[in-house]
Image: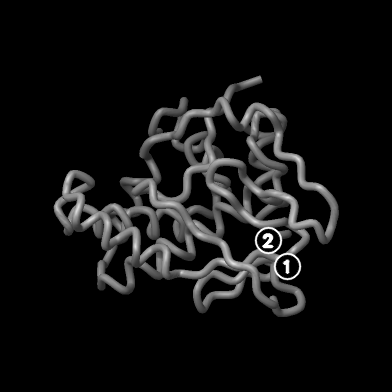
Amino acid sequence: MKSIRVALAAAAAGIALTACSSPLQAGAAAVVGDERISADQLNVKVQGFEAALKQAKIDPSQLPLPINQFVLLGMTNEAAARQLAAKYQVQVSEAEVDAALKDPGQQSSPEVNLLSKGVVPTDARGYVRAEVGLKKVVDSLGGQQNQQAMAKLRADYGSIKVVYSPRYGTFDPQQGFVDTGRFGKVEPPAQQQQQQQPQG
Protein backbone atom coordinates (compact mmCIF):
# COMPACT_ATOMS: atom_id res chain seq x y z
CA MET A 1 0.00 0.00 0.00
CA LYS A 2 1.16 3.51 -0.79
CA SER A 3 1.13 6.13 1.89
CA ILE A 4 -0.55 9.49 1.73
CA ARG A 5 0.05 12.51 3.92
CA VAL A 6 -3.13 14.42 4.52
CA ALA A 7 -4.42 17.14 6.79
CA LEU A 8 -7.62 19.01 7.46
CA ALA A 9 -6.09 22.15 6.01
CA ALA A 10 -8.58 24.55 4.50
CA ALA A 11 -7.32 26.23 1.34
CA ALA A 12 -3.89 26.92 -0.04
CA ALA A 13 -3.19 29.96 2.11
CA GLY A 14 -3.85 28.14 5.37
CA ILE A 15 -7.03 30.11 5.95
CA ALA A 16 -9.65 28.26 7.93
CA LEU A 17 -13.26 28.05 6.88
CA THR A 18 -15.85 28.97 9.45
CA ALA A 19 -19.01 26.93 9.44
CA CYS A 20 -22.38 28.23 10.49
CA SER A 21 -25.53 26.45 11.49
CA SER A 22 -28.67 27.53 9.67
CA PRO A 23 -31.45 25.88 7.69
CA LEU A 24 -30.26 23.99 4.62
CA GLN A 25 -32.18 23.25 1.46
CA ALA A 26 -33.34 19.67 1.04
CA GLY A 27 -30.83 17.59 -0.89
CA ALA A 28 -27.90 19.88 -0.13
CA ALA A 29 -24.69 18.52 1.37
CA ALA A 30 -23.41 22.04 2.00
CA VAL A 31 -23.85 25.66 1.00
CA VAL A 32 -20.70 27.75 0.55
CA GLY A 33 -21.49 31.44 0.26
CA ASP A 34 -24.01 31.55 -2.58
CA GLU A 35 -23.04 28.15 -3.99
CA ARG A 36 -24.97 24.98 -3.23
CA ILE A 37 -23.24 21.58 -3.20
CA SER A 38 -25.89 18.93 -3.69
CA ALA A 39 -25.84 15.48 -2.15
CA ASP A 40 -25.89 14.07 -5.69
CA GLN A 41 -22.79 16.08 -6.66
CA LEU A 42 -21.04 14.83 -3.54
CA ASN A 43 -22.00 11.22 -4.25
CA VAL A 44 -20.52 11.40 -7.76
CA LYS A 45 -17.27 12.85 -6.40
CA VAL A 46 -17.12 10.23 -3.63
CA GLN A 47 -17.49 7.39 -6.13
CA GLY A 48 -14.69 8.84 -8.26
CA PHE A 49 -12.51 9.38 -5.20
CA GLU A 50 -13.00 5.81 -3.98
CA ALA A 51 -12.02 4.49 -7.42
CA ALA A 52 -8.94 6.77 -7.49
CA LEU A 53 -7.83 5.60 -4.03
CA LYS A 54 -8.15 1.99 -5.16
CA GLN A 55 -6.18 2.66 -8.34
CA ALA A 56 -3.44 4.40 -6.35
CA LYS A 57 -3.40 1.49 -3.86
CA ILE A 58 -4.11 3.81 -0.93
CA ASP A 59 -6.04 2.46 2.04
CA PRO A 60 -8.96 4.76 3.00
CA SER A 61 -7.97 4.28 6.65
CA GLN A 62 -5.08 6.68 6.00
CA LEU A 63 -7.54 9.54 5.55
CA PRO A 64 -8.25 11.77 8.56
CA LEU A 65 -12.01 11.64 7.91
CA PRO A 66 -14.55 9.25 6.39
CA ILE A 67 -14.37 9.54 2.60
CA ASN A 68 -17.65 11.42 2.15
CA GLN A 69 -16.64 14.07 4.70
CA PHE A 70 -13.12 14.35 3.29
CA VAL A 71 -14.39 14.84 -0.27
CA LEU A 72 -17.04 17.31 0.91
CA LEU A 73 -14.33 19.32 2.66
CA GLY A 74 -12.36 19.45 -0.59
CA MET A 75 -15.46 20.64 -2.43
CA THR A 76 -16.15 23.39 0.11
CA ASN A 77 -12.51 24.50 0.01
CA GLU A 78 -12.74 24.74 -3.78
CA ALA A 79 -15.96 26.74 -3.71
CA ALA A 80 -14.70 29.20 -1.09
CA ALA A 81 -11.34 29.71 -2.83
CA ARG A 82 -13.09 30.25 -6.18
CA GLN A 83 -15.40 32.88 -4.67
CA LEU A 84 -12.52 34.67 -2.98
CA ALA A 85 -10.46 34.71 -6.20
CA ALA A 86 -13.48 36.13 -8.03
CA LYS A 87 -13.86 38.85 -5.40
CA TYR A 88 -10.25 39.90 -6.00
CA GLN A 89 -10.77 39.58 -9.78
CA VAL A 90 -7.92 37.11 -10.17
CA GLN A 91 -7.69 35.26 -13.48
CA VAL A 92 -6.08 31.83 -13.85
CA SER A 93 -4.96 30.65 -17.27
CA GLU A 94 -5.29 27.12 -18.62
CA ALA A 95 -1.48 26.93 -18.72
CA GLU A 96 -1.32 27.74 -15.00
CA VAL A 97 -3.86 25.00 -14.28
CA ASP A 98 -1.88 22.54 -16.42
CA ALA A 99 1.34 23.36 -14.54
CA ALA A 100 -0.33 23.03 -11.12
CA LEU A 101 -1.81 19.66 -12.09
CA LYS A 102 1.76 18.36 -12.50
CA ASP A 103 2.86 19.54 -9.05
CA PRO A 104 3.38 16.63 -6.60
CA GLY A 105 3.66 18.94 -3.60
CA GLN A 106 5.16 16.82 -0.79
CA GLN A 107 3.54 13.66 -2.09
CA SER A 108 4.92 10.88 -4.26
CA SER A 109 3.03 12.07 -7.35
CA PRO A 110 0.61 14.77 -8.54
CA GLU A 111 -2.24 12.25 -8.28
CA VAL A 112 -1.48 11.48 -4.64
CA ASN A 113 -1.13 15.22 -3.96
CA LEU A 114 -4.69 15.74 -5.20
CA LEU A 115 -6.00 12.74 -3.27
CA SER A 116 -4.45 14.21 -0.11
CA LYS A 117 -6.79 17.18 -0.57
CA GLY A 118 -9.95 15.14 -1.16
CA VAL A 119 -9.85 15.71 -4.92
CA VAL A 120 -10.43 13.19 -7.71
CA PRO A 121 -7.29 13.44 -9.93
CA THR A 122 -9.26 12.92 -13.15
CA ASP A 123 -11.68 15.72 -12.22
CA ALA A 124 -9.33 18.23 -10.65
CA ARG A 125 -9.22 21.27 -12.94
CA GLY A 126 -11.84 23.20 -10.99
CA TYR A 127 -10.14 22.58 -7.66
CA VAL A 128 -6.68 23.39 -9.01
CA ARG A 129 -7.95 26.57 -10.71
CA ALA A 130 -9.43 27.74 -7.39
CA GLU A 131 -6.27 26.83 -5.48
CA VAL A 132 -4.01 28.67 -7.95
CA GLY A 133 -6.39 31.64 -7.85
CA LEU A 134 -6.18 31.81 -4.07
CA LYS A 135 -2.38 31.65 -4.19
CA LYS A 136 -2.36 34.49 -6.72
CA VAL A 137 -4.55 36.56 -4.38
CA VAL A 138 -2.05 35.97 -1.57
CA ASP A 139 0.87 36.88 -3.85
CA SER A 140 -0.91 40.04 -5.05
CA LEU A 141 -1.21 41.16 -1.43
CA GLY A 142 2.51 40.75 -0.81
CA GLY A 143 2.55 37.13 0.29
CA GLN A 144 1.91 35.55 3.66
CA GLN A 145 4.59 37.79 5.21
CA ASN A 146 2.30 40.81 4.79
CA GLN A 147 0.41 40.33 8.03
CA GLN A 148 -1.97 43.25 7.55
CA ALA A 149 -3.01 42.06 4.09
CA MET A 150 -3.33 38.48 5.30
CA ALA A 151 -5.57 39.61 8.15
CA LYS A 152 -7.88 41.29 5.62
CA LEU A 153 -7.80 38.20 3.43
CA ARG A 154 -8.70 35.97 6.38
CA ALA A 155 -11.58 38.29 7.19
CA ASP A 156 -12.79 38.13 3.58
CA TYR A 157 -12.44 34.35 3.58
CA GLY A 158 -14.24 34.09 6.91
CA SER A 159 -17.13 36.11 5.50
CA ILE A 160 -17.89 33.23 3.10
CA LYS A 161 -20.39 31.31 5.19
CA VAL A 162 -20.28 27.54 5.00
CA VAL A 163 -23.30 25.54 6.12
CA TYR A 164 -23.06 21.74 6.21
CA SER A 165 -25.94 19.31 6.24
CA PRO A 166 -26.54 18.10 9.82
CA ARG A 167 -25.72 14.57 8.69
CA TYR A 168 -22.05 15.59 8.53
CA GLY A 169 -21.99 17.61 11.75
CA THR A 170 -20.18 20.92 12.00
CA PHE A 171 -16.59 21.44 10.90
CA ASP A 172 -13.81 22.49 13.24
CA PRO A 173 -10.35 23.05 11.68
CA GLN A 174 -8.68 21.38 14.67
CA GLN A 175 -11.05 18.44 15.13
CA GLY A 176 -12.66 17.89 11.73
CA PHE A 177 -16.39 17.22 11.61
CA VAL A 178 -17.88 17.04 15.08
CA ASP A 179 -21.20 15.88 16.42
CA THR A 180 -24.06 18.36 16.26
CA GLY A 181 -26.09 16.26 18.67
CA ARG A 182 -28.79 15.74 16.10
CA PHE A 183 -27.77 12.75 14.00
CA GLY A 184 -25.50 10.84 16.35
CA LYS A 185 -21.87 11.14 17.25
CA VAL A 186 -19.33 11.79 14.50
CA GLU A 187 -16.05 10.18 15.52
CA PRO A 188 -13.04 11.49 13.59
CA PRO A 189 -10.21 8.93 13.39
CA ALA A 190 -7.48 9.37 15.97
CA GLN A 191 -4.71 9.61 13.39
CA GLN A 192 -5.98 12.96 12.12
CA GLN A 193 -4.30 14.66 15.06
CA GLN A 194 -0.94 13.40 13.82
CA GLN A 195 -1.23 14.41 10.18
CA GLN A 196 0.96 17.07 8.62
CA GLN A 197 -0.33 19.65 6.20
CA PRO A 198 0.59 18.97 2.58
CA GLN A 199 2.17 21.85 0.71
CA GLY A 200 1.50 22.85 -2.88
Q: Which mark is residue 42?
A: 2
**Nearer-the-camera pick, 199 or 46:** 199
> Dot 1: what SS?
helix
The disc at residue 115 is none
Q: Residue at left 61%, top 32%?
A: 192
Specify the color scheme. one colour
Q: Residue 142 location, x and y as percent? A: 14, 52
The residue carrying pointer 2 sits among few (fewer than 14), some (14 to 19) or many (20 or more) residues within 10 Å by Cα, namely some
142 displayed left or right of 119: left
Mark 1 vs mark 2, CA separation in Å:
5 Å
| Of residues 197 and 193, the one drawn nearer to the viewer in this rendering | 193
Quadrant that contains the C terminus: top left
Residue where numbered disc 1 is placed: 40
Residue 16 appears anywhere in the view = yes
- Structural crowding at the residue carrying mark 1, measured as other residues with C-alpha within 10 Å and reported as few (<14), some (14–19) or many (≥20): few
Q: Look at 41% across and 61% down and name the residue there.
A: 81
Q: Are marks 1 and 2 in contact (CB under 8 Å)?
A: yes
Asked if 34 appears above or below 104 in the picture, the reply is below
Position of 172 with respect to 190 (left or right) is left
Disc 1 marks which amino acid?
Asp
Query: Does 78 sit left or right of 44 as displayed?
Result: left
Q: Residue 147's x, y, as percent?
A: 20, 50
> What kind of element bears circle 2?
helix
Circle 2: residue type: Leu
Residue 10 vs 188, above or below: the answer is: below
Place of residue 175 in the rendered image (x, y in percent of width and height, measured from the top left): 61, 41
Q: Quarter-wise, where is residue 176 in the image?
A: top right
